[in-house]
Image (tube, rainbow, N blue to C red):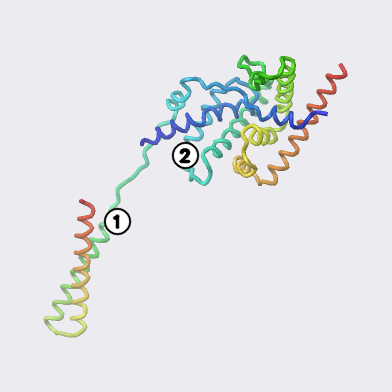
Amino acid sequence: MINEERIASALEAAPAVTLPPDFTARVMSNLPVRAALPRARTNFGRTALSGSLVLLFCALLGAFLLNSQHGSLAATLVEWTSLVQLAGVTLWLSLRSRELHS
Amino acid sequence: MHPDDTFEAVVEQHGPMVFRTLLRLIGSREHLEDLAQEVFLRLYRALPSFRGEALVSTYLYRIIVNVAQDEWKRRSREDEPLRSITDEDEGWGDRLPHPSRNAEEQLQDSEFAAIVEAHLQSLSAVERSVLVLYHQEERSYQQIAQALQMPIGTVRTHLHRARKKLRERVERQALQEVRR
């Protein structure tokens, strides 16, 4: 009978291998040139931001005109809300701009 | 660091493992370097989709087994006879040095290793892969299962069957030699 351990030890013995000295260099020279990922710049965020600011400014202007002609509570509310929003956006943009340039 | 610098380090680190595993799986030093290059080329191509759930080594074992399978298919198509790795000059028989043992015992060991090697090549692709990964590379059942993409239970079954077949074939040859 063949000793099972003897077979196992024959299997466990790894064959002697010697890597060719320039193997790594050859592998590296044969690697395909990886094409740079197409990264087209998009300005969706900036466009949306500009559009929203224009809308907000128009709303503020409309509310100001309406309030100066009729002086209703609703127009005052819209005017102040728009003003606060515009001030908030301006503050946020100026802080973000400082972060990006620091 | 440039990504290619990292890949160069991977080649340096895993090169010996790739060579010895491929050598054991294909049973010949012929085209060994080309096949090892193919392994790293496939790894490089697969890197963008490598999400790091597995170790690079486990991923590499999977690629090695695939490359070896392609080589077996190519050889069977070309009807290329397998040459034992003991035929080569690079001292396969010297890999188990036992300074305390006498020359006859060492010769017996190297002959026995050659017999085991020859019968290893007669096993099926998956049985050979499981045996090599478990015994030579000392991978766990889980790592083998990941590398071969099969359940752990299937790995155990293949391992058990492969050991049994190998033992029976080695025993059969030993009996035949005794009768001569």
Helix, strand or loop at label 2? It is helix
Where is residue B129? Give x, y as percent: 65, 34
Where is residue B159? Give x, y as percent: 71, 38
Mark 1 nearby-residue class (10 Å; few <14, some 14–19, many ≥20): few
Where is residue A82? Give x, y as percent: 21, 73
Amino acid type, label 1: Phe
Amino acid type, label 2: Leu
Q: Nearer the viewer, residue B166 or A88?
A: B166
Where is residue B176? Give x, y as percent: 84, 21
* Residue found at the far right of this picture: B179
Q: Which mark is residue A44?
A: 1
Q: How many marks?
A: 2
Helix, strand or loop at label 1? It is helix
Which residue sits at x=70%, y=46%? B153
Write down the chain letter for disc 1. Answer: A
Residue at the disc numbered 2: B47
